[in-house]
Image: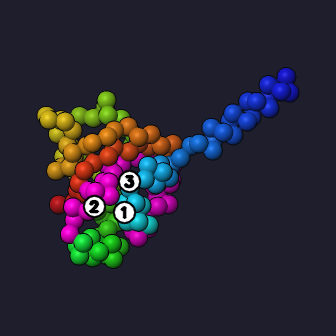
Amino acid sequence: MKRYLAICLMSFAAAAAQAKDIVDTAVAAGNFKTLATALQAAGLVDTLKGPGPFTVFAPTDAAFAKIPKADLDALLKDKAKLAAVLAYHVVPGKVMAKDVKAGKVKTVQGSDLTVTTANGVMVDNAKVTATDIAADNGVIHVIDSVVMPK
């Protein structure tokens, strides 16, 4: 019985150690370095490490590279604008790919994202390239462009 209990406790500890929040999950993926830097510059790391749940439409490093360097540098230095842009990529709740419906979706920033599903899933003008990257406080869907609030 003691041995069984010890095995159960070790399994629980291993599972707890493997659980990652949205920020840690994105960092571990390796292709969200610019997003991680931006979250830190905007002061949003603690929010996305919070209980959530959140759905994040996460632009890759290649998506951020589409923004001219001078514009990206300026955005990274403007904490309020950067926070608004990043919050526009976050939807409250955990929305898995199978639950996505076309239409308007309210973001944490306050504006609506437009989701279309006609030729693959699009979020505003960004194509969703990967879905359902699970985190313990939500889910990440990868997008190929940075979307800007209106």
Q: Describe the colour scheme in one phrase.
A: rainbow
- Image spot of residue 105 (x, y percent): 25, 45
Q: Do residues under tags 3 and 1 come within 8 Å of each other at their CB atoms?
A: no
* Residue located 21% across and 61% down the image: 66
> Could you tell me how far apart the alpha carbons at marks 3 and 1 are, in whole angstroms?
8 Å
User: Which dot, 3 or 1, sits closer to the camera?
Assistant: 3
Q: Which residue is mark 3?
A: 31
Q: Amino acid at mark 1?
A: Thr
Q: Do residues under tags 2 and 1 come within 8 Å of each other at their CB atoms?
A: yes
Which one is in front, 82 or 33? 33
Q: Amino acid at mark 3?
A: Asn
Q: Is residue 36 above or below residue 3?
A: below
* Residue located 68% across and 35% down the image: 12
Q: Which mark is residue 64?
A: 2
Secondary element under disc 2, as helix, strand or loop, is helix
Q: Quadrant of the C terminus?
A: bottom left
* Residue located 69% across and 40% down the image: 13
Disc 2 crowd, CA 10 A, few/some/many (<14, 14-19, 20+): some
Q: Which mark is residue 34?
A: 1
Disc 3 crowd, CA 10 A, few/some/many (<14, 14-19, 20+): some
- Image spot of residue 43 (x, y percent): 44, 67
Which one is in front, 3 or 69? 69
Magenta span: 41-68
> Could you tell me how far apart the alpha carbons at marks 2 and 1 are, in whole angstroms?
7 Å
Q: Quadrant of residue 84?
A: bottom left
